[in-house]
Image (cartoon, rainbow, N blue to C red):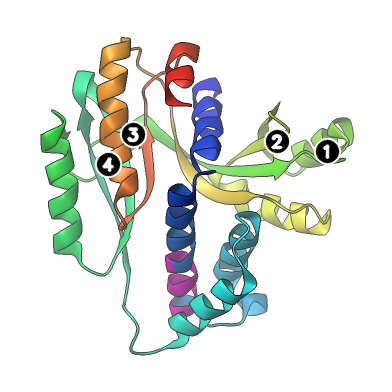
Amino acid sequence: MSGHNKWSTIKRKKGATDAKRSKIFSRIIKEITVAVKEGGPDPDGNPRLRLAIANAKGASMPKDNITRAINKGSDKDSANYQETSYEGYAPNGIAIFIDCTTDNLQRTISNVRSYFNKFGGSLGTNGSLAFLFDRKGVFTIPKGNINMDELEMELIDAGAEDIQLEDDMITVTTAMEDFGPMLKKLEEMKIETENAELQRIPKNTVKVDQETARKVMKLIDHFEDDDDVTNVYHNMELTDEMMEEME
């Protein structure tokens, strides 16, 4: 789990830049739009929308942006997004799993394939790498004045598999089936998350040298910079040296 938590930490640091924040906002707007089209504009009766709005607030998205995104999703003439995923290998056999939300599947697959080709990777068949990852609920919570002992007792009862504190940020991991109950528990405790989502966590990580790590990270950066890409997961082991280079 430590490799996953390291990557969560570096993603938060990268997310501090204006460009990355803009990408985060774009991703959340798409999620709100999809949630509204799927379950309507009322968050009280639409759990997916309620979660998307909570993540928007956790990312400090202005209220006006959230309202516009809800209205956009309610507009029958707005783009219809599809959720899809792609799997492949980066250099040195590193598994890459890419989640996308797109209004043009042909554009998205073309871009994904070109990134793999450019950086010496290969696009695989859907489903070929899923067994390398577990689907987990991951919650990031600002530490604030939270009493960690009390929190751990409450959240373990609610299904927490792992609770870690790093850089004043608490990361809680649950099994996929405990994601909903944990979300409800945090709402009952009036604890606001910075982000809550289902992620793909590698079952095992692969060690690589620094040069290979650079190549893999360049590929991942290209994926993450693509507007259609919502999340990128990998099974590369991140050392402290790699972390320092990415900061």
Image position of 147 (left or right of 221): right
Across and down, in percent, residue 27 comes to: 43, 59
What residue is pinned by disc 1?
151
Nearer-N-terminus badge (3/2)? 3
Q: Is residue 123 visible?
A: no
For the point 82% across and 56% down, which residue is it? Answer: 190
User: Is 163 contained in the magenta span?
Assistant: no
Q: Position of residue 60 (x, y in %)?
A: 63, 58
Residue 170: mark: 2
Residue at image mark 4: 222
Q: What residue is drawn where x is 60% and y is 50%?
A: 195
Residue contact at pointers 1 and 2, CB within 8 angstroms: yes
Q: Are marks 1 and 3 in contact (CB under 8 Å)?
A: no
Whether 158 is drawn above or below 108: the answer is above
* Amino acid on which disc 3 is placed: Phe
The residues bearing labels 3 and 4 have C-alpha atoms spaced at a distance of 24 Å
Please name the amino acid that badge 1 sits on: Leu
Circle 4: residue type? His
Q: Which residues are magenta?
A: 30-37
Instruction: Check if mark 3's residue and mark 2's residue have beta carbons within 8 Å.
Output: no
Give the foreground label among 3 and 4: 4
Q: How far apart are labels 1 and 3 at the CA level?
A: 32 Å
Task: Count neighbours of disc 2 (C-alpha within 10 A) and say few if under 14, some if 14 to 19, many if 20 or more.
Answer: many
* Quarter of the figure with the N terminus: top right
The answer to which of 241 and 6 lies nearer the viewer is: 241
